[in-house]
Image (tube, grey):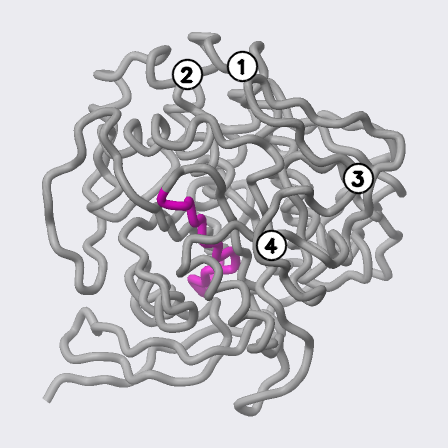
Protein backbone atom coordinates (compact mmCIF):
# COMPACT_ATOMS: atom_id res chain seq x y z
CA UNK A 1 0.00 0.00 0.00
CA UNK A 2 1.58 3.32 -1.02
CA UNK A 3 2.65 5.65 1.73
CA UNK A 4 0.63 8.81 2.37
CA UNK A 5 2.88 10.08 5.12
CA UNK A 6 3.52 13.82 5.02
CA UNK A 7 7.08 14.85 4.07
CA UNK A 8 9.13 16.55 6.76
CA UNK A 9 9.05 20.33 6.71
CA UNK A 10 11.66 22.59 8.29
CA UNK A 11 10.02 25.44 10.18
CA UNK A 12 11.35 28.96 9.85
CA UNK A 13 11.51 29.28 13.61
CA UNK A 14 14.13 26.56 13.72
CA UNK A 15 16.50 28.16 11.26
CA UNK A 16 19.73 29.65 12.63
CA UNK A 17 19.93 33.43 12.57
CA UNK A 18 22.63 33.35 9.95
CA UNK A 19 20.06 31.76 7.57
CA UNK A 20 17.13 34.22 7.65
CA UNK A 21 13.80 33.25 6.16
CA UNK A 22 13.54 34.54 2.61
CA UNK A 23 10.32 35.80 1.04
CA UNK A 24 11.56 37.18 -2.24
CA UNK A 25 8.88 38.22 -4.68
CA UNK A 26 10.57 37.00 -7.81
CA UNK A 27 8.14 35.75 -10.37
CA UNK A 28 5.14 37.95 -9.73
CA UNK A 29 7.08 40.91 -11.02
CA UNK A 30 7.83 38.87 -14.13
CA UNK A 31 4.24 37.71 -14.42
CA UNK A 32 2.91 41.24 -14.25
CA UNK A 33 5.45 42.31 -16.82
CA UNK A 34 4.14 39.70 -19.23
CA UNK A 35 0.45 39.55 -18.40
CA UNK A 36 -0.31 43.20 -17.65
CA UNK A 37 2.00 45.40 -19.62
CA UNK A 38 4.41 43.62 -21.91
CA UNK A 39 2.66 43.61 -25.24
CA UNK A 40 5.47 45.84 -26.44
CA UNK A 41 7.89 43.06 -25.64
CA UNK A 42 6.00 40.72 -27.96
CA UNK A 43 7.01 42.77 -30.98
CA UNK A 44 10.44 43.63 -29.72
CA UNK A 45 12.15 40.40 -28.77
CA UNK A 46 13.51 37.58 -30.92
CA UNK A 47 10.76 34.97 -30.49
CA UNK A 48 12.84 32.03 -31.64
CA UNK A 49 15.66 32.66 -29.18
CA UNK A 50 13.22 32.97 -26.28
CA UNK A 51 11.12 29.99 -27.34
CA UNK A 52 14.06 27.62 -27.61
CA UNK A 53 14.86 28.15 -23.91
CA UNK A 54 11.38 27.12 -22.72
CA UNK A 55 11.59 24.10 -20.40
CA UNK A 56 8.96 21.37 -19.85
CA UNK A 57 5.92 22.51 -17.90
CA UNK A 58 4.10 21.17 -14.83
CA UNK A 59 0.71 19.46 -15.06
CA UNK A 60 -1.81 20.88 -12.60
CA UNK A 61 -4.30 18.74 -10.67
CA UNK A 62 -7.36 18.19 -12.86
CA UNK A 63 -5.79 19.98 -15.80
CA UNK A 64 -7.32 19.29 -19.18
CA UNK A 65 -5.22 19.96 -22.24
CA UNK A 66 -6.50 22.15 -25.02
CA UNK A 67 -5.12 24.14 -27.93
CA UNK A 68 -3.51 27.49 -27.06
CA UNK A 69 -5.39 30.58 -28.20
CA UNK A 70 -4.47 32.37 -31.37
CA UNK A 71 -2.55 35.58 -30.79
CA UNK A 72 -5.02 38.31 -29.98
CA UNK A 73 -7.96 35.98 -29.39
CA UNK A 74 -7.82 35.39 -25.63
CA UNK A 75 -11.36 35.61 -24.32
CA UNK A 76 -12.77 35.70 -20.80
CA UNK A 77 -11.18 36.15 -17.40
CA UNK A 78 -7.67 35.15 -16.38
CA UNK A 79 -6.54 33.59 -13.10
CA UNK A 80 -2.80 33.01 -12.64
CA UNK A 81 -1.19 31.74 -9.44
CA UNK A 82 2.36 32.90 -8.85
CA UNK A 83 4.64 31.36 -6.21
CA UNK A 84 8.23 32.00 -5.18
CA UNK A 85 10.30 29.44 -3.30
CA UNK A 86 12.87 30.16 -0.60
CA UNK A 87 15.01 27.09 -1.25
CA UNK A 88 17.95 29.09 -2.53
CA UNK A 89 17.88 27.62 -6.01
CA UNK A 90 19.21 29.63 -8.90
CA UNK A 91 22.22 30.99 -7.03
CA UNK A 92 23.19 28.76 -4.12
CA UNK A 93 26.58 30.43 -3.89
CA UNK A 94 24.97 33.75 -3.03
CA UNK A 95 21.98 32.67 -0.96
CA UNK A 96 23.09 29.36 0.50
CA UNK A 97 21.36 25.99 0.29
CA UNK A 98 18.15 25.67 2.26
CA UNK A 99 16.93 22.40 3.76
CA UNK A 100 13.25 23.15 3.10
CA UNK A 101 11.29 23.97 -0.03
CA UNK A 102 8.50 26.40 0.86
CA UNK A 103 6.28 28.71 -1.16
CA UNK A 104 7.01 31.77 0.94
CA UNK A 105 5.43 34.01 -1.69
CA UNK A 106 1.99 33.05 -3.00
CA UNK A 107 -0.03 35.47 -5.12
CA UNK A 108 -3.09 35.24 -7.32
CA UNK A 109 -3.59 37.49 -10.35
CA UNK A 110 -7.24 37.85 -11.44
CA UNK A 111 -8.13 39.72 -14.64
CA UNK A 112 -11.79 40.43 -15.30
CA UNK A 113 -13.56 38.87 -18.28
CA UNK A 114 -13.84 42.23 -20.01
CA UNK A 115 -10.12 42.86 -19.37
CA UNK A 116 -10.84 46.23 -17.76
CA UNK A 117 -9.33 45.58 -14.32
CA UNK A 118 -6.91 43.33 -12.47
CA UNK A 119 -6.56 42.29 -8.83
CA UNK A 120 -3.42 40.78 -7.30
CA UNK A 121 -4.01 38.98 -3.98
CA UNK A 122 -1.05 38.26 -1.67
CA UNK A 123 -1.40 35.30 0.70
CA UNK A 124 0.73 35.67 3.86
CA UNK A 125 3.23 32.82 4.11
CA UNK A 126 2.04 32.01 7.67
CA UNK A 127 -1.67 32.00 6.77
CA UNK A 128 -3.13 28.91 8.49
CA UNK A 129 -5.48 27.17 6.04
CA UNK A 130 -6.57 23.67 4.97
CA UNK A 131 -3.82 22.28 2.73
CA UNK A 132 -5.34 20.28 -0.11
CA UNK A 133 -4.94 16.53 -0.45
CA UNK A 134 -2.27 16.31 -3.15
CA UNK A 135 -0.75 13.40 -5.10
CA UNK A 136 2.35 11.79 -3.59
CA UNK A 137 4.97 11.15 -6.31
CA UNK A 138 5.56 7.74 -4.70
CA UNK A 139 1.88 6.84 -4.97
CA UNK A 140 -1.36 7.73 -3.27
CA UNK A 141 -2.12 11.15 -1.85
CA UNK A 142 -0.83 13.26 0.99
CA UNK A 143 -3.83 13.76 3.30
CA UNK A 144 -5.37 17.18 3.74
CA UNK A 145 -4.39 18.99 6.93
CA UNK A 146 -4.57 22.45 8.47
CA UNK A 147 -1.18 24.14 8.25
CA UNK A 148 0.62 27.26 7.05
CA UNK A 149 0.03 27.86 3.37
CA UNK A 150 3.76 27.93 2.61
CA UNK A 151 4.13 24.17 3.17
CA UNK A 152 1.94 23.36 0.14
CA UNK A 153 4.98 23.34 -2.18
CA UNK A 154 6.67 20.67 -0.06
CA UNK A 155 3.56 18.51 0.08
CA UNK A 156 2.83 18.41 -3.62
CA UNK A 157 4.74 20.97 -5.63
CA UNK A 158 3.21 23.78 -7.67
CA UNK A 159 -0.02 21.79 -8.35
CA UNK A 160 -0.64 21.50 -4.60
CA UNK A 161 -0.31 25.26 -4.10
CA UNK A 162 -2.84 25.84 -6.88
CA UNK A 163 -5.31 23.29 -5.47
CA UNK A 164 -4.99 24.73 -1.95
CA UNK A 165 -5.68 28.28 -3.17
CA UNK A 166 -8.58 27.09 -5.34
CA UNK A 167 -10.16 25.44 -2.30
CA UNK A 168 -9.57 28.55 -0.20
CA UNK A 169 -10.93 31.09 -2.69
CA UNK A 170 -13.52 29.15 -4.68
CA UNK A 171 -11.85 30.29 -7.91
CA UNK A 172 -10.64 28.03 -10.72
CA UNK A 173 -6.96 28.66 -11.45
CA UNK A 174 -5.80 27.20 -14.78
CA UNK A 175 -2.40 28.95 -14.94
CA UNK A 176 0.53 28.91 -12.52
CA UNK A 177 4.25 29.62 -12.27
CA UNK A 178 7.08 29.21 -9.75
CA UNK A 179 10.43 30.94 -9.45
CA UNK A 180 13.30 31.73 -7.06
CA UNK A 181 15.80 34.52 -6.45
CA UNK A 182 17.26 35.13 -9.87
CA UNK A 183 13.95 36.07 -11.48
CA UNK A 184 13.80 39.43 -9.74
CA UNK A 185 17.48 40.09 -10.44
CA UNK A 186 16.98 39.57 -14.17
CA UNK A 187 13.82 41.63 -14.28
CA UNK A 188 15.14 44.62 -12.33
CA UNK A 189 18.26 44.63 -14.50
CA UNK A 190 16.16 44.39 -17.67
CA UNK A 191 14.20 47.56 -16.94
CA UNK A 192 17.24 49.49 -15.77
CA UNK A 193 16.21 49.50 -12.12
CA UNK A 194 13.03 50.13 -10.14
CA UNK A 195 12.76 53.43 -8.24
CA UNK A 196 11.16 53.25 -4.79
CA UNK A 197 10.48 55.84 -2.08
CA UNK A 198 11.96 55.33 1.40
CA UNK A 199 10.23 57.49 4.05
CA UNK A 200 12.56 56.38 6.84
CA UNK A 201 15.92 54.67 6.37
CA UNK A 202 15.99 50.86 6.38
CA UNK A 203 18.54 49.12 8.59
CA UNK A 204 18.05 45.35 8.73
CA UNK A 205 20.90 43.69 10.62
CA UNK A 206 19.57 40.20 9.97
CA UNK A 207 20.08 40.30 6.20
CA UNK A 208 22.73 43.08 6.35
CA UNK A 209 20.75 45.54 4.28
CA UNK A 210 20.79 49.34 4.63
CA UNK A 211 18.94 51.84 2.48
CA UNK A 212 18.88 55.58 3.14
CA UNK A 213 15.69 57.63 3.01
CA UNK A 214 14.70 59.22 -0.28
CA UNK A 215 14.14 58.01 -3.84
CA UNK A 216 16.28 54.92 -4.50
CA UNK A 217 16.68 53.01 -7.78
CA UNK A 218 17.14 49.29 -7.15
CA UNK A 219 18.81 46.79 -9.46
CA UNK A 220 20.09 43.23 -9.07
CA UNK A 221 20.83 42.10 -5.52
CA UNK A 222 19.59 45.36 -4.00
CA UNK A 223 16.16 44.66 -5.51
CA UNK A 224 16.21 41.16 -4.01
CA UNK A 225 17.21 42.49 -0.59
CA UNK A 226 14.48 45.12 -0.70
CA UNK A 227 11.90 42.37 -1.27
CA UNK A 228 13.45 40.19 1.44
CA UNK A 229 13.70 42.87 4.11
CA UNK A 230 11.40 42.30 7.09
CA UNK A 231 12.95 43.38 10.37
CA UNK A 232 13.91 46.76 8.94
CA UNK A 233 10.39 47.65 7.73
CA UNK A 234 7.29 48.76 9.65
CA UNK A 235 6.59 46.61 12.68
CA UNK A 236 9.00 43.89 11.51
CA UNK A 237 6.22 41.46 10.59
CA UNK A 238 5.78 39.44 7.44
CA UNK A 239 2.53 41.35 6.82
CA UNK A 240 4.52 44.60 6.74
CA UNK A 241 6.90 43.02 4.25
CA UNK A 242 3.99 42.18 1.93
CA UNK A 243 3.00 45.85 1.69
CA UNK A 244 6.63 46.68 0.89
CA UNK A 245 6.53 44.15 -1.94
CA UNK A 246 3.31 45.67 -3.24
CA UNK A 247 5.06 49.06 -3.33
CA UNK A 248 7.84 47.54 -5.46
CA UNK A 249 5.37 45.90 -7.86
CA UNK A 250 3.41 49.11 -8.32
CA UNK A 251 6.62 50.97 -9.14
CA UNK A 252 7.65 48.17 -11.50
CA UNK A 253 4.38 48.27 -13.43
CA UNK A 254 4.73 52.03 -13.85
CA UNK A 255 8.35 51.66 -14.98
CA UNK A 256 7.60 49.00 -17.57
CA UNK A 257 4.82 51.06 -19.14
CA UNK A 258 7.06 54.06 -19.76
CA UNK A 259 8.06 54.79 -23.36
CA UNK A 260 11.70 54.29 -22.31
CA UNK A 261 10.95 50.61 -21.57
CA UNK A 262 8.11 49.46 -23.81
CA UNK A 263 9.15 49.56 -27.41
CA UNK A 264 12.86 49.48 -26.52
CA UNK A 265 14.03 46.29 -28.29
CA UNK A 266 16.91 45.69 -25.90
CA UNK A 267 14.78 46.06 -22.76
CA UNK A 268 11.84 44.17 -24.27
CA UNK A 269 14.05 41.22 -25.13
CA UNK A 270 15.65 41.24 -21.68
CA UNK A 271 12.21 41.26 -20.03
CA UNK A 272 11.07 38.27 -22.05
CA UNK A 273 14.24 36.34 -21.29
CA UNK A 274 13.98 37.15 -17.57
CA UNK A 275 10.52 35.59 -17.49
CA UNK A 276 11.31 32.49 -19.54
CA UNK A 277 14.71 31.73 -18.05
CA UNK A 278 13.74 32.10 -14.38
CA UNK A 279 10.37 30.41 -14.08
CA UNK A 280 8.83 26.96 -14.01
CA UNK A 281 5.35 27.20 -15.49
CA UNK A 282 2.27 25.01 -15.69
CA UNK A 283 1.73 23.29 -19.04
CA UNK A 284 -1.11 25.74 -19.64
CA UNK A 285 1.23 28.74 -19.25
CA UNK A 286 4.22 27.19 -20.99
CA UNK A 287 3.29 28.39 -24.44
CA UNK A 288 4.49 31.74 -25.76
CA UNK A 289 1.29 32.19 -27.73
CA UNK A 290 -0.73 31.99 -24.52
CA UNK A 291 1.48 34.58 -22.84
CA UNK A 292 1.27 36.88 -25.83
CA UNK A 293 -2.51 36.50 -26.03
CA UNK A 294 -2.86 37.39 -22.34
CA UNK A 295 -0.71 40.45 -22.80
CA UNK A 296 -2.73 41.62 -25.80
CA UNK A 297 -5.98 41.09 -23.91
CA UNK A 298 -5.11 43.27 -20.93
CA UNK A 299 -2.45 45.67 -22.17
CA UNK A 300 -4.69 48.73 -21.75
CA UNK A 301 -5.66 48.29 -18.08
CA UNK A 302 -5.00 51.62 -16.38
CA UNK A 303 -2.86 51.93 -13.25
CA UNK A 304 -5.82 52.73 -11.01
CA UNK A 305 -7.57 49.54 -12.12
CA UNK A 306 -4.66 47.34 -11.00
CA UNK A 307 -5.29 46.63 -7.30
CA UNK A 308 -2.81 44.89 -4.99
CA UNK A 309 -4.55 43.50 -1.90
CA UNK A 310 -3.39 41.38 1.03
CA UNK A 311 -5.54 38.40 2.02
CA UNK A 312 -7.33 39.60 5.19
CA UNK A 313 -5.80 38.07 8.30
CA UNK A 314 -4.51 38.73 11.79
CA UNK A 315 -1.96 37.03 14.00
CA UNK A 316 -3.21 34.27 16.29
CA UNK A 317 -3.01 30.53 17.02
CA UNK A 318 -4.67 27.55 15.36
CA UNK A 319 -3.90 23.88 14.76
CA UNK A 320 -1.29 24.00 17.52
CA UNK A 321 0.86 26.74 15.97
CA UNK A 322 1.13 30.48 15.75
CA UNK A 323 0.45 32.20 12.46
CA UNK A 324 -1.95 34.40 10.52
CA UNK A 325 -5.63 33.51 10.92
CA UNK A 326 -7.99 34.29 8.03
CA UNK A 327 -10.60 36.99 8.53
CA UNK A 328 -13.15 34.97 6.62
CA UNK A 329 -15.92 37.56 6.44
CA UNK A 330 -13.60 40.03 4.70
CA UNK A 331 -12.12 37.32 2.47
CA UNK A 332 -15.63 36.32 1.40
CA UNK A 333 -16.34 39.87 0.23
CA UNK A 334 -13.10 39.90 -1.79
CA UNK A 335 -13.49 36.53 -3.51
CA UNK A 336 -17.22 36.86 -4.10
CA UNK A 337 -16.41 40.03 -6.03
CA UNK A 338 -13.73 38.27 -8.06
CA UNK A 339 -16.00 35.28 -8.78
CA UNK A 340 -18.66 37.71 -9.97
CA UNK A 341 -16.05 39.57 -12.04
CA UNK A 342 -16.60 42.82 -10.16
CA UNK A 343 -13.79 45.33 -9.65
CA UNK A 344 -12.77 46.01 -6.05
CA UNK A 345 -11.82 49.19 -4.26
CA UNK A 346 -9.76 49.56 -1.10
CA UNK A 347 -11.03 51.34 1.99
CA UNK A 348 -8.18 50.53 4.40
CA UNK A 349 -4.57 51.60 4.72
CA UNK A 350 -1.73 50.65 2.39
CA UNK A 351 -0.28 48.17 4.90
CA UNK A 352 1.99 48.07 7.93
CA UNK A 353 5.16 48.57 5.90
CA UNK A 354 4.20 51.54 3.73
CA UNK A 355 2.60 54.97 3.83
CA UNK A 356 1.23 57.31 1.16
CA UNK A 357 3.80 59.68 -0.33
CA UNK A 358 2.30 63.16 0.26
CA UNK A 359 4.74 64.84 -2.12
CA UNK A 360 4.16 62.55 -5.08
CA UNK A 361 2.51 63.63 -8.30
CA UNK A 362 -0.26 61.54 -9.83
CA UNK A 363 1.03 58.54 -11.78
CA UNK A 364 0.02 58.89 -15.41
CA UNK A 365 -0.81 55.87 -17.54
CA UNK A 366 -0.53 56.72 -21.26
CA UNK A 367 -3.86 56.26 -23.01
CA UNK A 368 -5.74 55.37 -19.80
CA UNK A 369 -8.24 57.17 -17.61
CA UNK A 370 -7.04 59.56 -14.90
CA UNK A 371 -5.58 57.38 -12.13
CA UNK A 372 -5.78 57.67 -8.37
CA UNK A 373 -3.29 59.69 -6.37
CA UNK A 374 -2.94 59.60 -2.59
CA UNK A 375 -6.30 57.93 -1.91
CA UNK A 376 -6.48 54.15 -1.76
CA UNK A 377 -8.23 54.00 -5.12
CA UNK A 378 -10.81 55.89 -7.18
CA UNK A 379 -11.78 52.76 -9.12
CA UNK A 380 -15.49 51.92 -8.78
CA UNK A 381 -16.50 48.50 -7.55
CA UNK A 382 -17.04 46.45 -4.44
CA UNK A 383 -15.67 48.25 -1.39
CA UNK A 384 -13.45 45.85 0.56
CA UNK A 385 -13.42 45.84 4.38
CA UNK A 386 -10.58 47.84 5.90
CA UNK A 387 -8.83 44.60 7.00
CA UNK A 388 -8.00 44.01 3.32
CA UNK A 389 -5.03 46.35 3.00
CA UNK A 390 -3.18 47.24 -0.18
CA UNK A 391 -2.74 49.80 -2.93
CA UNK A 392 -3.26 50.39 -6.62
CA UNK A 393 -0.52 50.61 -9.22
CA UNK A 394 -1.37 54.31 -9.49
CA UNK A 395 -0.52 55.06 -5.88
CA UNK A 396 2.82 56.50 -4.91
CA UNK A 397 3.79 55.05 -1.53
CA UNK A 398 6.91 55.04 0.63
CA UNK A 399 8.49 52.34 2.76
CA UNK A 400 8.34 52.90 6.51
CA UNK A 401 11.83 51.81 7.51
CA UNK A 402 13.11 51.09 11.01
CA UNK A 403 16.32 50.05 12.72
CA UNK A 404 16.31 46.30 13.18
CA UNK A 405 16.72 44.95 16.68
CA UNK A 406 19.07 42.22 15.53
Q: Foreground mark, 4 or 3?
A: 3
Q: Is residue 44 above or below residue 400?
A: above
Task: Read off the residue under disc 1.
Answer: 261
Find residue 87 and report its horizontal and vertical position in percent: 46, 55
The answer to the question of whether label 2 and label 1 lie on touching residues, with beta carbons closer than 8 A, is yes
Q: Is residue 303 above or below residue 176?
A: above
Find residue 34 and report its horizontal and vertical position in percent: 41, 31
Q: Nearer the viewer, residue 76 or 14?
A: 76
Task: Read off the residue under disc 4.
Answer: 309
The answer to the question of whether label 1 and label 4 lie on touching residues, with beta carbons closer than 8 A, is no
- For marks 4 and 3, give the CA distance: 16 Å
Task: Read off the residue under disc 2.
Answer: 40
Q: Quadrant of the N terminus?
A: bottom left
Task: Read off the residue under disc 3.
Answer: 374
Q: Earlier in the sequence, mark 3 or mark 2?
A: 2
Residue drawn at x 22%, y 45% is: 284
Find residue 369 and report its horizontal and vertical position in percent: 60, 27
Q: Judge whether residue 392 is colored magenta.
A: no
Amino acid sequence: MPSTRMPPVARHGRLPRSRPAVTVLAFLASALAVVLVSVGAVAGFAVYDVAKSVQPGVKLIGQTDGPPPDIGSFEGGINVLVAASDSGGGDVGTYGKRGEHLNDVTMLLHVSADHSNATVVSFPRDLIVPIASCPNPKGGNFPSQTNKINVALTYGGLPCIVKTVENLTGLTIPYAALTEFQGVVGLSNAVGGVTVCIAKAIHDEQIHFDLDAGQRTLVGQDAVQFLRVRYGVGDGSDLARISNQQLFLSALVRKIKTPETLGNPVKDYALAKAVIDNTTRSDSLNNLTTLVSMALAVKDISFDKVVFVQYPGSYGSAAGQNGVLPIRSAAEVLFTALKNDQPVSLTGKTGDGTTNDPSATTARDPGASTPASGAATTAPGVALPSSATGQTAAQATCTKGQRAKG
